[in-house]
Image (cartoon, rainbow, N blue to C red):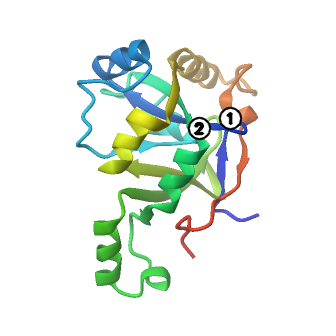
Amino acid sequence: MNKYNIRANYDDTSIRVYQAYCPEIALPALEAQRFVPPFKMSRMTWIKPSFNWMMYRCGYASKPGQEIVLGIDITREGFEWALQNAALSTFKQDIHGTHEAWKRELETKPVRIQWDPERDWKLNPMEGIRSIQIGLSGEAVDHYVNEWTLHISGVTPMAKAIAEAVSEGRPEPPEGHPSLSEKLYPLPPGTPVPV
């Protein structure tokens, strides 16, 4: 199996990504169903299709500034635009040739891609499988906030339920765990993948 695959919950028109924020940003976003101030359009914002990787990143919604986990349904068209307008966040000689070529790509592309070790539901690394993180900046953030976002859900209760299941040593994840319904997403042409 190709280790560079995207696993996500998606349908014909939308795909779910995750972010974790402090209440000051997350609660207004939930109420408005879009990101509003104090969310900063000028900052890079990272979205993650893998629920398990989001849990790893935010510590089951326990890390400061990441107490509320959001599931954001965005258009597949927008998601694929992001992938096709992305540069890898790290230099890969086989792809870029030179550091100068890589830096030029970073300057011209509004999206960054990182491939990190995927996690299982207990946050153990999964050998040979990478999880994508997508960093949006500039015009990509504007598209994300004003065009791509279809619906924002609060998924913090699930994060807390999973943390409890892990701490109690349960052998199976809680019912409804989002990763159980994630499936492979077809990589669009032009998606940067390390070789």
Q: Within 10 angstroms of label 2, few (less than 14), some, or many (20 or more) residues?
A: many
Give whichever of discs 1 and 2 has the lower sequence position.
2
Q: Does residue 158 appear anywhere in the picture? A: yes
User: Which residue: 67% across, 36% down?
Assistant: 9
Question: Which quadrant holds residue 194?
Answer: bottom right
Label 2 sits on a secondary structure element that is helix
Q: Position of residue 75 (x, y in %)?
A: 57, 39
User: Which residue: 74% across, 19% down?
Assistant: 175
Is 145 left or right of 167, judged from the image as shown?
A: left
* Distance between the alpha carbons at the discs numbered 1 and 2: 7 Å
Residue 94 sits above or below residue 128 on the image: below
135, 83: nearer the viewer: 83
Quarter of the image that includes the N terminus: bottom right
Q: Within 10 angstroms of label 1, few (less than 14), some, or many (20 or more) residues?
A: some
Disc 1, disc 2: CB below 8 Å? Answer: yes
The residue under label 1 is 179
Label 1 sits on a secondary structure element that is helix
Q: Which mark is residue 52?
A: 2
Q: Position of residue 29 (x, y in %)?
A: 38, 20
